[in-house]
Amino acid sequence: MTVTELAASCGFTIAAQADPDRPVDGCYCGDLLSWVMGRAQADCAWITIMSNVNVVAVGSLADVACVILSEGVTADEKLLETARVKGVNILYSEKPTYETATAVYRATGAA
Amino acid sequence: MSESLTFTYDVDGEDFTSAGQASVQVKKNLRRLGLSPEIIRRVSIAMYEGEINMVIHAGGGKADVVVYEDRIEIVLTDHGPGIPNVELAMKEGYSTASDSVRSLGFGAGMGLPNMKRYTDDMRIDTEVGRGTVITMTVRLDA
């Protein structure tokens, strides 16, 4: 399932579309950036409530398929522009983190 | 062949928002060299953690990335306060970062452990009041 298909399936908003056809494999939830870099798998959807610009660097370096800002959190335009330049997809979810993760799980069937 | 390719970066100690620029640049350069995504991921995460540490603790520094035929070496050099207790600093969850740094999502006490986790070898040469040199190696033939 691609990032675009995931967004459509789960009702997420695409805030920064950098690589819309990138496949999503799995999901990781976390807000401590080093913890995420230590544990998140490449190609996963990373769910966080952090919205500072370092999230883009972590998303890029950890090589995640997309970053989903949950709980209705949004990012400023500077972050979104940086994400487009660095090839990081950013999605918004109005749902709480747990529900966002279960929606990703149902959509992708990932364990 | 014993040729190597060296990339050198200055890490700005003042600017938290630009932290990671050197790592992202390394990622791009390694991708151009045709290295595997997993190797690139390991090198760039290890380097990013080092970069962040230099910004948080040392007021910046220098990063040298040397690509050899069989390995990549990352050498991070700073003239910060040094690490008084390396064994403690290597423990997951131990951090001396400030609350403001933590509010950005850093300071989880995972920086040095992640650097070790993602590299095949890591050496720390540090002296209080003088600075720290961290040398990490990622093997390409593993």
Image: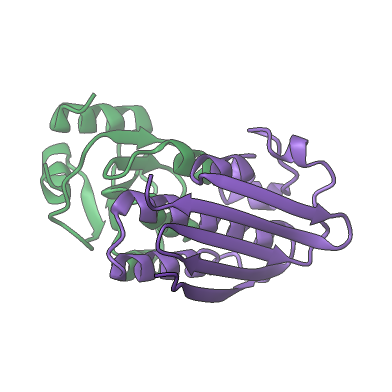
Q: In the figure, B124 relative to B93: above or below?
A: below
> Quarter holding the N terminus of chain B?
bottom left
> Quarter holding the C terminus of chain B?
top left
Q: Is residue B90 left or right of residue A88?
A: right
Residue A68 versus residue A86: which sits nearer the camera? A86
In the figure, residue A77 lies in which quadrant? bottom left
Residue at screen point 22% across, 33% down: A104
Q: Is residue B65 left or right of residue A97?
A: right
Q: Is residue B57 left or right of residue A85?
A: right
Q: Where is residue A78 in the image (x, y as percent from the top left)?
A: 41, 69
Q: Which chain is green?
A: A
Q: The purple chain is which one?
A: B
User: Extreme top residue here?
Assistant: A111
Q: In the figure, A76 relative to A102: above or below?
A: below
Residue at screen point 63% across, 45% down: B112
Residue B119 versus residue A71: which sits nearer the camera? B119
Residue at screen point 57% across, 51% down: B104
Q: In the figure, B38 relative to B61: above or below?
A: above
Residue at screen point 20% across, 42% down: A24
Q: Where is residue B73 in the image (x, y as percent from the top left)?
A: 53, 60
Using the rendered image of the protein, determine whether residue B134 is visible from the camera's viewpoint. Answer: yes
In the figure, residue A76 lies in which quadrant? bottom left
Residue A80 versus residue A40: which sits nearer the camera? A40
Q: In this view, does B106 lie to the left or right of B44?
A: right
